Amino acid sequence: MSTQTVSRVINDRPDVSPQTRANVKKVILDLGYSPNTIARSLSRGRTNTLGVVGFGLKYFGPSSVLTGIERKANELGFSIILTLCEQFEGGDTDQVLLQLSAQQVEGIIWAIPGFIDSLDPSRMVKEKLTIPIVYLNRDCLNSSVVVSMDNRSGGYIATEHLFEQGYHKIGIITGPKTWWEANERLIGWREVMREKNFTDIDDLIFEGNWEAESGDRGFQTLKSKNPDLDAIFVSNDQMSLGVIHAANRMGISIPDKFGIVGFDDLPESSFYIPPLSTVKQDAKKLGALAVTRLVEWIESESDQECDTQEKNLVSPELIIRQSSVREKALISHT
Amino acid sequence: MSTQTVSRVINDRPDVSPQTRANVKKVILDLGYSPNTIARSLSRGRTNTLGVVGFGLKYFGPSSVLTGIERKANELGFSIILTLCEQFEGGDTDQVLLQLSAQQVEGIIWAIPGFIDSLDPSRMVKEKLTIPIVYLNRDCLNSSVVVSMDNRSGGYIATEHLFEQGYHKIGIITGPKTWWEANERLIGWREVMREKNFTDIDDLIFEGNWEAESGDRGFQTLKSKNPDLDAIFVSNDQMSLGVIHAANRMGISIPDKFGIVGFDDLPESSFYIPPLSTVKQDAKKLGALAVTRLVEWIESESDQECDTQEKNLVSPELIIRQSSVREKALISHT
DNA sequence: CTGTTAGCGCATTCAT
DNA sequence: ATGAATGCGCTAACAG
């Protein structure tokens, strides 16, 4: 019995007699044998492995993205090698990319949030690497494949909703301004404000840091600068909680005197007091989409990088709960 | 120039002349060459790769554990292949283990929460596999290496604290009773109740599902069964939020009329209203510890499985905020 | 249908 | 200090 025959059986090749095939299968089962993937990869020149570079799993969004990535990759027959860069070690990102490349991943998902002064891989390294890289949640300007949440539209619908509910002066608490996502949400807000003919809106903007504590501070700051402020679009749910906290402490009732819309739709945000209206992003879907695009690219073999940059936007959805609705109609927890 | 010389340079072997070494290094840099890890693994018989099997990243705990695992593995020079089993596909776990083994991981971290009717790998497969497996957060009874949070002690200190604060009748909202962690926290609570000479405590127990919504239901149920109930130990922070929500709706003021202690210490739980007292678990540390133990085992070569089962408990810490403190002393958000 | 030959890229062992 | 031979476990290409 030669190794080839075994190889054929394992790979379900047609050219084996049913007899031998059965025999081989039986022995494989008895021995508990499983083929060495490493050797197979070396021989085939394909690893069926994807590299994922993330920024940390502290927040719900990134965790969901990763889940989406893993599930979809698994479904398509790819394994995931995970690397997390929590701290901003400059230049280390090149190292990560090189390492992944050395491990022969067939493609990379770069899920580091797009900073303005970013810890991106250097152009030099990127050009040397021939592996497909799909970027997540960042600017579309360059010539790479980028898959993103439509943060801008999210900011827009949130703000628009607040106006529709009869609030008159709407501030924003942003994420750190170096983050692409934070900026996009801000732009969405700006668009609505422009349409409503607001000018001189700088005093309506507070830069938070994604943490609840900064939402608390943001509310105080904005409210003191604008006593007539009656609503805020808050760029994530954690900071929204901080806002609720501060409003509560200051005796400002939500949603009667003050409206809030958050961003993310954490599982628990429907249990805030009051339940939080928010922009829901389907991060799992985003992750899955990134994998789909990446695998398409890998499978296509062709070196053509980007064809459809515009199709890679995932739309968020406005979830209306009590924190932004003055009428007493909506009380159910959805 | 033979491949050997290059190999020697790459692996920092001493027996190369400084001259050639410099040359080779230069060329490597110019070419942007990096060694093929796959081939190296095949040749060396070592992959420097760990397999991690998780259950999902929906909650803060598992995400933090994974972060801890990745960071520590990276530090020790190991890569991580991640597999997530979100759904209970029975028997599939064997598949996962086999797959990981085929990928030649040098060890596995099994971070699937310990269910009673568990989706554990089958004994058959486990015995065939010669790879070290470290289990996370589960029972210590068997002969494997297990690294866990000390959930029991967590339940104990939380409950004890509530009594110390002058609450008299203390219920518990548990996680799903099939989870080992949920059970352990319950046991901790039971111990205190026994010490306080409570009998017939079944009506003080409500089984939740980790979600905020079940905390809400739990509070209502327990309160209606026990009108004199004045505190609950809630087995995670999300459910605690549900409890706060329900209490608020029913006009029961916290902490004056009712005390709550949660479990986890989510980043935002200090911004609940009121800020939540909770049992903080350092999940990153737990993940890191699992990796440390696993790598020790791998490096030790010896087939001796477990030496120090008892050392692998990580202690949680009680964080006291307002939800369990009647005096108005503590108002800071820590 | 089955076996033989060769090679994936590297590292170990032994020569030189 | 360097090079040549050999093998890791598997598969592709060809031969029988």
Image (cartoon, coloured by chain):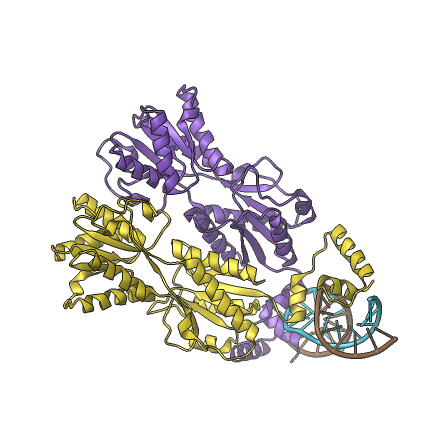
Chain colours: A yellow, B purple, C cyan, D brown
Residue displayed at 41% across by 19% down: B197
Work out whether residue B57 can be spotted.
Answer: yes
Residue A279 vertical position relative to residue B113 in the rendered view, above or below = below
Residue A333, how many percent across, how many down? 33, 45
Q: Residue furthest left?
A: A227
In the visual, does A260 lie left or right of A32?
A: left
Residue A177, how many percent across, how many down? 28, 65
In the visual, does B284 lie left or right of B231?
A: right
* Quadrant assignment, res B33: bottom right
Work out whether residue A54 can be spotted.
Answer: no
Residue B47, how many percent across, how many down? 61, 60
Viewer-proximal residue among B325 and B223:
B223
Residue displayed at 27% across by 37% down: B249
Residue displayed at 42% across by 74% down: A309
Residue B72 vertical position relative to residue A135 in the rendered view, above or below = above
Viewer-proximal residue among B77 and A278:
A278
Position of the N terminus of chain A, as image quadrant, is bottom right
Residue A311, how many percent across, how many down? 42, 71
